[in-house]
Amino acid sequence: MHGEAWTRYWRDPERPLEAMHAHFYEHVYAPHRHDTYSFGFTEEGAQRFHCRGASHVSGAGMVMAFNPDEPHDGRSSSDLGYQYRIVHIGPGLVRAVLADAAAGGGRPAPLPLFAEPAFHDQVLSRALTRLHAALTCGAEELVREERLIAAVTAMAARGATRPPRVRTLPGGGGQNRAVLRARDVLRERFAEQVTARDLADAAGVSRFALYRAFREEYGMAPSDYQRHLRLSRARQLLASGRPAALAAAEAGFADQSHLHRWFVRSYGVTPGVFQRAGRIGRADAD
C-alpha cells in the first residue's frame, strides 16, 4: 500500500523554461524526447530509465541531464516509488546564458553535451534545487535570473563534455566601478522589480560577470543585497509606527507574510515583536 501520486507543474509564459515536481509510484513514461535540456534530481526513492542504449538508475541525491531531442523513458525502480524535480530549459536560453558567461561576452557559445545521464553531484543538486524553488515559488525576476545563470553554468562546467570558458571582470578599479553602478541602481530602486539585465546595462558588463563581481565585493548576490535594503527600510518604517502591512508594501515586499518570513529569518524576531519592543522602551523611559 502506498500514498497518492501527485504532480505540480510551472511554465514561463514567455521563455522556454518549465519546471515540474512529482511523486510517482506506478506511472510509466513512454519513450519520449524534449526540445529542451532537462536537468533533474531525485529526492526520494529511485527511478529507472533507458537512454543512449543503456539502462540507468537515478537514486536519491543523484542528478539527471538529458540533452535536447534525446529519447528516454522512465519508471519507479521499486514499489516505493520516487519523488523528483526537473527543469526544462530551451537550447537558445542555455546558449544565451553561456554566451553571457563566456570569455569576450556576447559571442556565440557552443552548446554543451552531457555524456552521462545520471550522476552524483551535491553542488549541482543544490543549484537545481534553488533554481526550481525560484521558478515554482514566485520569486522575483532578479532571483530567477541569478539562479538560472548559476544552474546552467554549473551544469555546463561540471557535467558537460564541452565546458564553457568563463569570463570574469578584471580586478581593481574596473570591477569596483561596475559593482558600484549596480549597487547604486539597487539603492535607488530597492522597492521595484529590478532585472539582471537592468543591473548589467547600468554596470556596462555581462550579467554573469556582474553577478560574480558583486558576490566577490559584497559576499552576496544582487537579489540578496536588494532584500537587505528592503529589510532595512522596513525596520525604519516599523520603528516609526507604520503598520506591518504598509511597511511591507512601501519597502517592496510582496505582502505582509513575505516581510514576516524574511524578517524572522534575518533578525530572529517577528516584525510585531520588533515594533512592540520600541513601544516598551518608550514606556519604561516615561
Image (cartoon, rainbow, N blue to C red):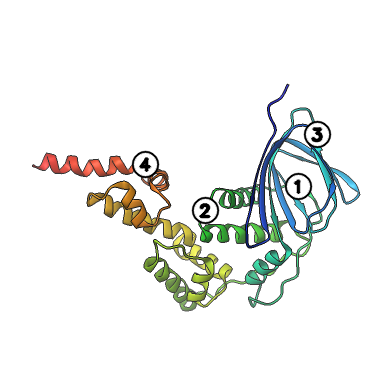
Q: Earlier in the sequence, mark 2 or mark 3?
A: 3
Q: Amino acid at mark 1?
A: Phe
Question: Marks 3 and 1: which is nearer the front?
Answer: 3
> Circle 3 is placed at which residue position?
77
* Mark 3 residue crowding within 10 angstroms, few (<14) / some (14–19) / many (20+): some
> Separation of disc 4 and disc 2 at Cα?
22 Å
> Separation of disc 4 and disc 3 at Cα?
43 Å
Relative to the observer, which residue lies in front, 72 or 175? 72
Where residue 223 sits in the image (x, y, percent)? 48, 59
Q: Amino acid at mark 3?
A: Ser
Question: Marks 2 and 1: which is nearer the front?
Answer: 2
> Circle 2 is placed at which residue position?
139
> Circle 1 is placed at which residue position?
119
Q: Amino acid at mark 4?
A: Gly
Q: Quadrant of residue 162?
A: bottom right
> Separation of disc 3 and disc 1 at Cα?
16 Å
> Circle 4 is placed at which residue position?
268
* Mark 1 residue crowding within 10 angstroms, few (<14) / some (14–19) / many (20+): some
Q: Earlier in the sequence, mark 3 or mark 1?
A: 3
Question: Marks 2 and 3: which is nearer the front?
Answer: 2
* Mark 4 residue crowding within 10 angstroms, few (<14) / some (14–19) / many (20+): few
Q: Are marks 4 and 3 in contact (CB under 8 Å)?
A: no
Q: Is residue 118 left or right of residue 184?
A: right
Q: Are marks 4 and 1 in contact (CB under 8 Å)?
A: no
> Separation of disc 2 and disc 1 at Cα?
28 Å
Please, what secondary structure does the residue beneath circle 4 have? loop
